[in-house]
Amino acid sequence: MTLDEARARDAADPLRHFRERFVLPEGVIYLDGNSLGPLPKATIAAMAHITEHQWGTRMVRAWNEGWMDAPQRIGGKIARLIGAEANEVIVTDSTSSNLFKLLVAALQQNPARRTILTEAGNFPSDLYVAQGAVRCVAGARLHCVARGELLAALSNDTAVLLLTHVHYKTAEAFDITSYSSAARQAGALTLWDLSHSTGAVPVDLGAAGADLAVGCGYKYLNGGPGAPAYLYVNKRWQNSLISPLNGWLSHAEPFAFVDGYRPAAGINRWLNGSPPMLAMTALESGVDLALEADIAALAEKSAALFACFADIGAALGLECVSPNDAARRGSHISFRHEAAYALSQALIARGVIGDFRAPDIIRFGLTPLYIGFQDVALAGEILREVVASGAWRDPQYSVRAAVT
Ligand SMILES: *Cc1c(COP(=O)(O)O)cnc(C)c1O
């Protein structure tokens, strides 16, 4: 793809106008929106509004003017992106905390089943949370197996199958429908982590028969650093699962201020304390923007951007570890490279921001809402220059920062 061809494709892109809705600094090609989405321009005004006119002027009265119901309201909006009903999703806590609540609840719901089954190499926080959850429930254990062995490992001891829909390293995607149905046939619940999916690839939890899910607000939803996360519980489980983190906002009558805990009906029981309204405001602004885009158009453009980037990588002899088939992957492309860290640093020094995942993966987020074909073509030229010249071998690029 030449630069002229890339510009022509951008001009014909039906999503092109979304780019203007983001703050995208000059001199940077941002291929890391799957790690931290950029700032939507509308979020600047939304943050000014909540601080000056809500917190600053309405003060405590603002709790009854759109704050108290923000977890349900924003959850209802995210529900539209993942094929859920409005009252099956709530915004609360972090992805990691939500995983903990659901894993413990799933184990406690059926004492005859003691195993959490997951994929070896799943996102580390998911594995660490699962290791903590099994310590909290008598007799529980965690079983991690390779992707290809998951279905055979389902047993009459499996309480819950915990899977991340789109793998953070390779972008490989599970078929939610077939894994959910295999788990159901084995008598187990499924818990899907949609952190790398929502806002980039189509997800239909209802049609797929999924039981539980969580996901992150700051990647493709552009909700801001550390944005609140969301949690999904299919209606059929809402009365039988109970969160281990009871708080006043998950009580049936939060303002009765009684001593005894009684879980709220429905999705509210997954709350615990007060929603962080400044962060909720930024998240809602990002979600509103995502809702404006047609998810099928996003998926189609993501596949086209991937094809262009894959061609560039192939021409350079880079080993792509992401699936070829668009239906089996998320919206990033990853390569294995002996010096992936140095390569990513050399690219960042030249304004191409992707990221490194230990030990040997370099990853580029192809976020279809605001990344264009020209971005991919320019990033490709810089990648070609860095690889061909061996510039990444410069020792300055192999010094590891504490946080990458
Ligand atoms: C980003 C991500 C998370 C993030 O969890 P936090 O609690 O927000 O840090 C969890 N799981 C997966 C699969 C992710 O990609």
Image (spheres, rainbow, N blue to C red):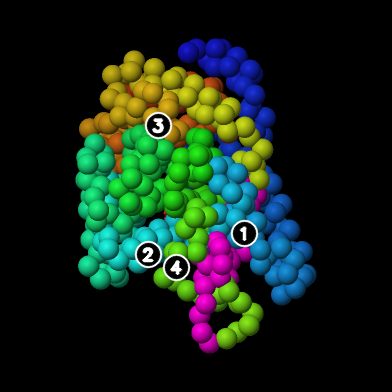
Marks 2 and 1, how far apart at CA = 24 Å
Q: Amino acid at mark 3?
A: Arg
Kindly identify the residue that appears in the image at 27 percent across and 31 percent down: 336
Q: Which mark is residue 72?
A: 1
Q: Residues within 10 Å of mark 1 (few under 14, many from 20)?
A: many
Label 4 CB less than 8 angstroms from ligand 1: no
Kindly identify the residue that appears in the image at 22 percent across and 46 percent down: 153
Q: Amino acid at mark 4?
A: Ser
Q: Is residue 83 visible?
A: yes
Pointer 2 residue: 109
Residue 192 in picture, x, y percent from top left = 41, 48
Q: Which mark is residue 329?
A: 3
Label 1 CB less than 8 angstroms from ligand 1: no
Q: Nearer the viewer, residue 245 or 49?
A: 245
Q: Amino acid at mark 2?
A: Gln
Q: Which residues are magenta?
A: 259-287
Label 2 CB less than 8 angstroms from ligand 1: no
Of circles 4 and 3, which is in front? Answer: 4
Marks 2 and 4, how far apart at CA = 10 Å
Q: Quadrant of residue 386?
A: top left
Kindly identify the residue that appears in the image at 44 percent across and 60 percent down: 98
Q: Amino acid at mark 1?
A: Gln
Marks 1 and 4, how far apart at CA = 17 Å
Residue 344 in picture, x, y percent from top left = 35, 36
Q: Earlier in the sequence, mark 2 or mark 4?
A: 2
Q: Nearer the viewer, residue 241 or 69?
A: 241
Pointer 4 residue: 243
Of circles 3 and 2, which is in front? Answer: 2
Q: Earlier in the sequence, mark 2 or mark 1?
A: 1
